[in-house]
Image (spheres, coloured by chain):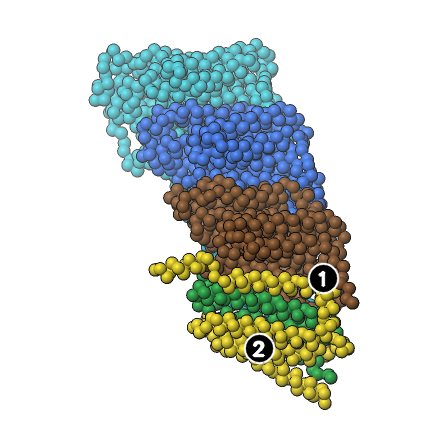
Amino acid sequence: MRGPDVSWYLIVSAILFSIGTAGVLLRRSPLIVLLSLEIMLNSANLALISFARLHGNHDGQIFALAVMAVAASEVVVGLGLIVAIARKQLDLDVDRLRVLRG
Amino acid sequence: MTTALIAVPLVAALVVWLLPLPGRAAGVLALLTALAEVVLWVIVVAGFDFGQGLQLQDRHSWFTDLGVSYHVGFFGYSLWLAGLTVVVSTAAIGYALRANRERGRAYHGLLLFLMGAIVGVFTAQDLLLFYVFFEAMLIPIYVLIGVWGGPRRVRATATFVIYTMAGSLLMLAAIVVFGLSQGTFSLVDSGTSSNEWVFLGFLAAFAVKAPIFPFHGWLVDAYRESPPEVAAILSGVVSKAAVYGLVRIVLAKFPEPVDDFQVVILAFAAVGLVYGSLLAFRAPDIRSVTAYSSMAQMGLITLGLFSLTDLGVNGAIVQSVAHGLVSATLFLLAGMVETRTGTSAFAGLGGMARGRPALATVLMTTGIVALAVPGSVAFAGEFLILAGVYGAGWGWAAVGAGAIVLAAMYMLRLISAVLHRAGGSDVHDDAPDLRPLELALVVPLIGLLLFLSAWPALISERV
Amino acid sequence: MITTPKVDWLALSPTLALLGASGVALLGSVLVPWWGRRAFTAFAAFAGFVTAGVLAAIVFDRSAESRLLIAESFTRDRLGALAAIIIAGAGALTVLVSWGENRRDHAGEYYALLAAAGAGMAFFVTAGNLMTLFLGLEWFSIALYILCALDTHRETSLEAGLKYLIVGGFGSAVLLFGSALVYGATGELGFSQIAAVGDTENVLLLAGLAMLIAGLGFKSSAAPFHMWTPDVYEGAPTSVTGFMAAATKVAALVLTLRILVVAFPDQEHLWTIAIAVLACVSLAVSNLAALVQRNVKRLLAYSSVSHAGFMLIAVAANSALGGRALLYYLIPYGAVSIGAFAVVAARERELAAPVTLDNLGGMGWERPFLGAAMWVFMLGAMGMPLTGGLLGKFYVFSAAYEAGLWWLIVAGVIATAISLYYYLGVIRALYMRPAAELKPALVGGSPPRDPLLQSAVFISLVVTVGSFFFVQPLIDLARDAAGGLPF
Amino acid sequence: MTAGAWLCLLAPLCGALLIALLGESISRRTAAWISTLSVFTAFGGAVVSFVGLLGREHENRAAVTTAWTWLAAGKFHAGLSLLVDPLSVTMMLIVSGVGGLIVLYSIGYMDGDPEERRYFGYMSLFVFSMLMLVQAGNFLLLLVGWGLVGLASYLLIGFWHDRPSAVAAAKKAFVMNAFGDATMALAFFVLIWQTGTLDFGRAFEGAGGLSQTVVNLVALGLLGGAVAKSAQIPLHTWLPDAMEGPTPVSALIHAATMVTAGVYLIVRTHPIFELAPSISDLAAGLGAITLLVAGVIALVQTDIKRVIAYSTMSQIGYMFLGAGLGAYGNGMFHLMTHAFFKALLFMAAGLVIHHLADEQDIRKMGGLRNAMPRTYIAFLIGSLALVGIPPLSGFFSKDSILASALASGGYGQLLFAAGLVGALLTGLYTFRLLFIVFLGEPSPLVREHDNGPAHGEGPWTMTLPVAVLAGLAVVGGWVEIAGVWHPFGEWLDPIAVGREHLALVEPTVTQDYVTSALAVGLGAVGIGVAWMLYGSRKWAVPRFAGVQRTLEHKLWFDELYDLLFYKPAGLVSRLLRHGVEEPLIGGSIEGVTLGAREAAGALGEAQTGYLRTYAFAIAAAVAVLVVVFITVQ
Amino acid sequence: MANVLVWAIWILAAGGCLGSGLAVITFRNPFFSALALIGNLGSLAVLFLLASAEFVAAAQVLVYAGAVMVMFLFVIAYLGDRREAPLAGGPSWMSLAALVAAAALLVEIVVVIGLKAGDALSDEASVNQAFGSPGEIGRLFLTDHLLAFEITSIVLLIAAVGGVVLGTRSRAEDEEELARARA
């Protein structure tokens, strides 16, 4: 059962990473920014898993699992924040959050 | 003993800060401490064996891995400079006490702290320790000027501190390089270096501190905005830290670069001398004249040091002491004039001699010493310096001699503008003569000047 | 039958103590009635930090040899222990500072999270492989995200929290991807194993290294990864800001040193220069930007970026002396940060408004102790004598010189000169405002005395000044700590 | 003997200090007497020294006494030492003797001035300084005294400090003298580096081995000091202005003592000048030019004291001429007689001024002879002595100088001619003054102040010194009669190093007589012309507007110096302030501050507050870092 | 044949993954974005499976696509129909720069991979059937990666606390609201 080799996985991972990056850098909705962060983390997971396959050790997979939990944690905190912001009747728009600057 | 001389004012500063005394009492305590310090200094001098090099050393390791230690001690010249410090500081504290500065505890504590730090500078025998004291001086000065200074004090202090710090930070870099390449930061143990960059780093700090043209951008504002007694310390004593640094570090540790750069430095010093004198000649108030004249004098002292002759170096030390006393006295007197007239600008002054014999006598005497009339200690210093620098080239001495004439011009202008002619618009007839307490501050300084004028060899032979 | 590995409990004890404290506080915030909640949780956290500090000291004492534990996932060495001590100290002081905040909501959670963040940092600095690194990072980061946003009624706090979270998440993602690439290049996660592979020409490894540096640079807020710092520092509750400034920096920089030295000795020629450049950029950017700041917290934030620059110089030196310099620097720096932010917090409480240079006016005279303390902290930040800041810079410059990075000395000198302007600006505001400006709008007269905050300030003061006089013992500690690294 | 010297030196110093320290606790009168007493004590000391010196062998008449090392550095040492030898004792006697008389005179003259104490303090200080100058045992102390007399002169010229003109005059005097001090100091630097010492004897010895250029430089430096102090062209412009000071000051400082210090200096350092003959000739030449120019200018001056001041310049020109040609003894001789008669003239003029309530303009005077007969006589004696009419003192001294000039070859004869013209001018301007002031009809001003005999000509403190000096002006010249009797010259001979006689030129008896005849004749002609013009007014005073104005402006020297030095200094100062100090030194700070602020502003802009900017920064930095790592490896 | 099938599945999964990823960042409505992310996570799970990470793939579907995303959707639903933020904002150069940066990162990583491809990256280790199995993973979590496992739980706990703290109303907010209501 020999599929594409690791490079292909990695390229997908790289593209995903860039997509995530673009999302964070471009979108104004904090929800979508958060989603983009998830994409970035997942791209890393993909890389980890393909490398785990490459090297034949489990470290990458374990790492990926841990990352999943971390990603979930970030999502929880991020969503909590978004909810708090929404409760303050603030726009859900990261560009509007610029009281702090300079 | 040396440590005591450093520590007494510092400890007293802490006491003054921490004890909840009324401002006056703090001032009295400070003054007593200062007087004790003078006595201590006299004891040190009495037991000092000139000609034996470094003495009264205290040495304790501070941190070993880089070879840094707390190491203090006295050379002949450091002793004189330290003496200058304690005397001028004492007068300054007395002045502050009489002026009854607001927030006396803070003020007097800072003055004491400054005194201790300066004595520390003049005794430090370890590069890092030297830097520590060198910078520690800035802390109280900054606040003293910034809080109690004139209307443009904020700008003046910022310029002053940043300017001087820029110089001394370069020195820090130089210290690091020098110390690590020597394997020790001890000034006693380290050898000489021929690294020109390091040399320039040290030079930068001292050039700013002195100041040597063109690094005097901070000078006038700082001297003009300071409280008079701080200006006295600043121009009289603090600038001498540069002298100590040049003698103890630059001349002693960098013989080759000094040789290479001698002409350049002499040129800058000479330019500063003439430039300062010329600007003093047209400066509009007592303090600016004194400020520019200080700059000129520091140029002269630098000429002496970099003449690289016994005459020049010894003369520079004599001149340092003389100028310290003179310019401190002048600033204190400027302060006294200001309290009477509210200004030190010549435009509003004049005719103060009429009916104020004490003020006239004191100002006249100081001014006369300041312009280095032959027979004065300032003359002795200048004579040695110029004689020394003649050895480096007759042109330097000629420039210096010309500057003496200029010095006469601006100093006489100052004296006349304050004392002579018809009464100025800001001089009220009821503006009193100097009070006995005020005289008690300046007369000892002048007395010292006259004593040294009778016997300048006291210093020049014992450097 | 799975045999669980033998766990070196002592090595983990600082972390566990804090974790325990966090748990206790968490329980307390639910179980203890509201009137005793703050006291209970605060005490728990304080006790946790103190215990952690003591335990870390014991670990330090008993870890003359560096050891890798549990499949090399973490390290028991003096470096980690010393860092843990500093972090614990910073945390304990933060507890003292924050007591007077009189937090009405989430007081218990606040202390629980503080302890948790401390635990995360204490663990993070001992991380031995990329996974524990990442997890430790997220551990304390997530706690800090929450702490930043904890003043949910304040918009700026939420803004700070969200910015920190998103930019932080972005940074973590970069770090993670970098870890993945390094893992891919070497097949190993452990730092020392990565070094053992020794494949210097591996581009994957290099790209991974670059991303790792970026991620860690983010945490230590080195420019250009620093841009979140001023915003977050300004928006976060002031006590949290102090903790972040002091403890996070300790954690991030110590680990940066550890991973670079342990895992990438063969790439030394690359990362020393990269770190040096980051240091330079940090120094330049932060000091210039700080010049025009009016908000004191923001100003201090830029100052912390600047200090990150200085400490990165020590990292870039890649030498035992550099390690010593870094560890020594962290001590006065931590004290200065905590202390300065504590003073800001005190002022904030009496004004009920953000502290700017303008409303700091005259504070030096009204609050002599806090004013004088702030003065000393500013001197410490400047690197003036009588504070350890001077010797920190001295050591850093020495390390740079020894490593031949003389241009970093020049950069440091210029940066310090620029920095004087704004540090002096604070002192100016404290003491030198003309009488007309000496009328800050105090709320409800003189605020109650806050002995805990003052004692925190006092301790910071003692450390700031004491580290100047008692260099030898501190340097011995630093030497022992840095000695475990394979320079 | 040395004790006498010390007493002589220190007595006035003590007087000055005492007056300064006691301040207002003593009456003004007491201060005056302290001062007088101190100066007469100094005279006593000088006499003691004189007697002590007389008691020694002729060749052995020099002693150095050192109190302590005044200045030392490295190998260089200069003691606080006094030199007692015939030359210094002569000067001590003149200074303290004439000085004492003038201080005594001041008691009357300054009576009633509110700041009398200060005046007498200054006077004592001056006498101390002058004694320091003449007794100095080495060059350095000489310079100290040199400067201190300048200082005292400054203080006394500007004594009435609420007069702007007095203050300006004082400053001018000081600055010009400072210039002279500077050139002297430079000469001393050369000596220090070339000979290693500033002791007279050793320096003279050392100077023998120096190259011509170096010696010339040293001599030139010394001459600079001498010219400035003695108000010789081109550094003479301060002297007329110095008449702003009280008249006794003019008598003491600007006639009898200080201004003649230049002559003393040349005589004292004659070994050096002898090694540099061209500079000696220059000194003589300058003296000749000065005596002519000053004489001409004196013709048109209208201020009584200024006329006498120009006359002083002119007479010192004679002394320079003599000293420059090597007739040191004659120069000193003229110095002494000049001290007598010029002090006399000033003090007599002072009586006039005192009488007329401080009026100095001779155009408002006239016919004072009747009101002040004794003053008139004194003035007449002084004038005759000045013109050199035998047997008054000026005759002997001036003619001896001219005779020496005649004996000094071609250059000397040229100077001799100048000296003769000078004699004519002297007669003319001296008696112009005398006739205008004392003869003719009393002017309205004179009548106004003529309150009859009750007013008198002054208190005894004023008239007594005048009488004494009148006597000295008559007999003072009899200590040296050409071809007959030379005790003065012989007395000074020991200061010549390594030769029997001090003077380099010895005129023959014939030359002496020819000179006397010519000089006296021309002087008489001058007096006659003055009589025709101003006494009997038979001739109209010729008017040449241009010449007149030029002379009244003192040949535009002041304007020239203003243009050459003072204005440029002010201009350069302003230029530096506006061209360097403010834009460059101050501006650099401004510039750096502004630059930093702009950079800070730009960074603030970059800190947009958009969190994606922050993320972008990270992304971009990572991108760059990766590229760099991969390409550099 | 098996290879072709694997390739086909791989291409489908990769395509789905990238397409849904793009969808996430381009949809205007966060709700659709979230749905797209679920698709993304699902296709990733397939890729994981193909890379012999069975347990991870399962976890991805269950935990991630299931639990986490459900929470996401809940929150989105909770926030309701607020006015949507504009798609992207700021000056256009900022967006352009962002795209350039993202593209640059992509290119760099691809180049890096390309440089390594062919030798190291195609040389896969041979693994047995147990590779990636829950048993294997579980064992590691209890031995070598014990700490990671524990920390993961701590992180989750902290996040939970955070969610609670941030999500609940605070007293200050209550009062504020009350005040607003009164006004």
Residue at left 69%, top 53%? Answer: C13
Image height of C128 relative to B318, above or below:
below
The 10 Å Cα crowd at callout 2, few under 14, some 14 to 19, many 20 or more, is: many
Q: Position of residue C199 (x, y in %)?
A: 74, 68
Is there any visible trace of residue D76 in the rendered image?
no
Q: Where does label 1 land, which residue?
A: C73
Q: Which mark is residue E38?
A: 2
Supply the letter of whichever chain is brown: C
Q: How many marks?
A: 2
Q: Which chain is blue?
A: B
**Mark 2 → mark 1, Cα distance in angstroms:** 33 Å
Q: Is residue A4 above or below residue D486?
A: below
Q: Colour of chain D?
A: cyan
In the figure, the shade used to draw chain E is: yellow
Q: Residue placed at 69% from the left, 60% from the top? A: C127
Q: Looking at the picture, tell me which residue is in the foreground, D90 or D608.
A: D608
